[in-house]
Image (spheres, rainbow, N blue to C red):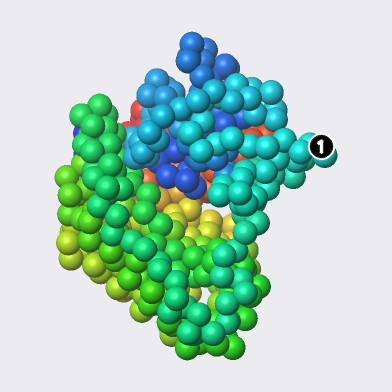
């Protein structure tokens, strides 16, 4: 099978010749640019041109094809960056970044990203990542105030740009292409209003939240209207996101999810299914989301990620047995919080083998990636322990 055929077979629950593999196909299966820089040096694959960083908040690398070849990766993220410019990160490495990445260094060693005259993101001195610090609707509380806000959507110029970039990329790669869309509702509310504020609004002001969610959903549908079905000719997967869980439980109760979030998710995902049925629908959601998986399946999602098996109720065998016929498990290959962070090389290799044995037991319905992104302090040896172990497993199939 080609990489694209292998990924598509896994999504369709058809037999695969090997375990499909993803690194960097979307913003939660990637590798921090600092770890990536050390990895390429270790492999002797450092380009004469600089490494690319396409996610400025999480500081994620956009791996070059030879790195993906070396690690046996079958997926790639949609390349929507219009141009690159050279910057020096706080760690001292030089990289290529998108044009809107122009951080301000503060006297205390922290950094800010400023857009339209406002500090939008802040990176503390000891951090590798930027945190969002502006929540545009945090002071809104009246439904009439929402009427005054244009949520936008349906930008045909933006859509045409995305389509043309995907069309070009399709001719340049045989890997499965993932197009990041978003479509966040619960997480979108925490970004618009602030986390604590939105959680209070969900319970105290449901009518207000429904009105906001209606406008937010309409904006997403307008964007999908100008994208679909055209992008399905070039991309293989459309990536939605909405973090629904903590380490111990869902962020909100099942009843609150069913009433306040589920209807909007279902409308967005079913719209995509109707107008681009061949485009696989992927949901990224961290945490202990097992109680919500039946709703997610009903909504029309085909893939869940990152399969955080260390979270409560997310046992790998249980997920495969209960949901493996209905949904693709994308991730779940190595626990970044525990095993990779503090385990030995042998611990990592053993965990990868165990997870692959569980999730690929029927040779389908699984795409390998570590659980969320490889962090900036992970050594090249640990990265290779993850991906070389999968290569060894695939070599024996």
**Which part of the image, by quadrant, shows the N terminus?**
top left
- Residue 239 x, y percent position in the rendering: 36, 53
Q: Which residue is mark 1?
A: 107
- Residue 360 x, y percent position in the rendering: 37, 48
Q: Is residue 264 above or below residue 381?
A: below
Q: Is residue 396 visible?
A: yes
Q: Residues within 10 Å of mark 1 (few under 14, many from 20)?
A: few
Q: Nearer the viewer, residue 132 or 389?
A: 132
- Residue 127 x, y percent position in the rendering: 72, 42
Q: Nearer the viewer, residue 106 or 47?
A: 106
Q: Residue at x 17, y 61 (%)?
A: 275
Q: Is residue 114 above or below residue 304?
A: above
Tell me: 80 left or right of 310.
left
Q: Is residue 110 above or below residue 395?
A: below
**To which quarter of the image does residue 113 belong?**
top right
Q: Nearer the viewer, residue 100 or 283?
A: 100
Tell me: 291 left or right of 173.
right
């Amino acid at each position: 099978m080609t990489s694209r055929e292998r990924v598509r077979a896994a999504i369709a629950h058809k037999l695969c010749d090997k375990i499909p593999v993803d690194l960097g196909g979307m913003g939660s299966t990637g590798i921090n640019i600092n770890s990536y820089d050390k990895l390429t040096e270790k492999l002797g694959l450092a380009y004469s041109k600089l490494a690319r960083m396409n996610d400025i908040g999480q500081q994620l690398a956009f791996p070059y094809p030879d790195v993906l070849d070396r690690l046996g990766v079958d997926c790639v993220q949609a390349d929507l960056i219009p141009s690159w410019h050279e910057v020096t990160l706080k760690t001292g490495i030089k990289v290529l970044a998108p044009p809107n990445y122009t951080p301000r260094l503060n006297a205390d060693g922290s950094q800010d990203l400023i857009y339209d005259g406002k500090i939008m993101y802040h990176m503390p001195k000891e951090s590798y990542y930027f945190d969002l610090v502006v929540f545009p609707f945090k002071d809104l509380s009246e439904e009439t105030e929402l009427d005054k806000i244009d949520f936008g959507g349906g930008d045909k110029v933006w859509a045409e740009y995305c389509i043309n970039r995907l069309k070009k990329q399709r001719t340049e790669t045989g890997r499965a292409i993932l197009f990041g869309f978003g479509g966040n509702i619960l997480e979108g509310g925490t970004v618009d209003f602030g986390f604590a504020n939105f959680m209070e609004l969900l319970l105290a002001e449901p009518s207000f939240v429904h009105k906001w969610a209606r406008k937010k959903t309409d904006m997403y549908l307008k964007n999908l209207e100008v994208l679909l079905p055209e992008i399905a000719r070039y991309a293989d997967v459309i990536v939605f996101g909405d973090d629904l869980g903590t380490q111990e439980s869902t962020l909100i109760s099942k009843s609150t999810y069913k009433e306040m979030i589920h209807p909007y998710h279902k409308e967005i995902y079913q719209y995509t299914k109707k107008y681009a049925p061949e485009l696989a629908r992927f949901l990224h959601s961290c945490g202990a989301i097992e109680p919500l998986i039946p709703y997610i399946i009903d909504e029309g999602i085909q893939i869940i990620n990152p399969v955080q098996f260390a979270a409560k109720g997310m046992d790998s065998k249980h997920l495969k047995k209960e949901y493996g016929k209905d949904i693709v498990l994308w991730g779940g290959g190595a626990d970044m919080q525990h095993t990779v962070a503090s385990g030995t090389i042998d611990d990592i290799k053993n965990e990868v083998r165990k997870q692959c044995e569980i999730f690929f037991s029927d040779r389908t319905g699984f795409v390998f990636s570590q659980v969320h992104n490889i962090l900036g302090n992970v050594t090249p040896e640990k990265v290779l322990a993850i991906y070389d172990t999968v290569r060894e497993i695939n070599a024996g199939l």
